[in-house]
């Protein structure tokens, strides 16, 4: 299980640039050794009241 910023997530976190993924781009990043099993998008509200998009993806070794 991997959680990361989704494709519409923030561009920066704590002042640092981030990489955003959709399920297909994260699968490509992991390579052929892993198979995407399932994924979901979550919209998380921060303590400051902003909304951030996260991707949760489940992979299995091939």
Image (cartoon, grey):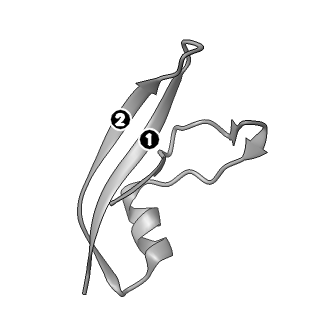
- Of the 4 image quadrants, the one containing the N terminus is bottom left
The vertical placement of 61 against 43, above or below, is: below
Asked where in the image residue 16 lies, by quadrant, the reply is top right
Q: Position of residue 37 (x, y in %)?
A: 21, 66
Q: Is residue 30 left or right of residue 57?
A: right
Q: Secondary structure at mark 2?
A: strand
* Residue ID at (37%, 86%): 32
Q: Nearer the viewer, residue 40 or 14?
A: 14
Q: Which residue is mark 1?
A: 54
* Residue ID at (34%, 41%): 41
- Report the Cα–Cα distance between label 2 and label 1: 5 Å
Q: Secondary structure at mark 1?
A: strand
Q: Which residue is mark 2?
A: 42
Q: Position of residue 47 (x, y in %)?
A: 54, 16
Number of on-image labels: 2
Crowd around label 1: few <14 · some 14–19 · many ≥20 (10 Å): many
Q: Is residue 26 left or right of residue 15?
A: left
Q: Earlier in the sequence, mark 2 or mark 1?
A: 2
Q: Position of residue 13 (x, y in %)?
A: 68, 38
* Residue ID at (61%, 36%): 10
* Residue ranking furthest to the left: 37
* Residue ranking furthest to the front: 47
CB atoms of marks 2 and 1 within 8 Å: yes
Q: Position of residue 53 (x, y in %)?
A: 46, 35
* Residue ranking furthest to the top: 49
Crowd around label 2: few <14 · some 14–19 · many ≥20 (10 Å): some
Asked where in the image residue 23 lies, by quadrant, the reply is bottom left
- Of the 4 image quadrants, the one containing the C terminus is bottom left
The vertical placement of 48 against 25, above or below, is: above
Say which mark, if any, is on residue 15.
Answer: none
């Amino acid at each position: 299980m991997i959680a990361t910023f989704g494709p519409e997530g923030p561009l920066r976190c704590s002042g640092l640039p981030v990489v955003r993924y959709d399920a297909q781009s994260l699968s490509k990043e992991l390579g052929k050794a892993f198979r995407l099993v399932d994924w979901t998008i979550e919209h998380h509200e921060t303590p400051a009241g902003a909304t951030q998009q996260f991707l949760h993806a489940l992979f299995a070794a091939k």
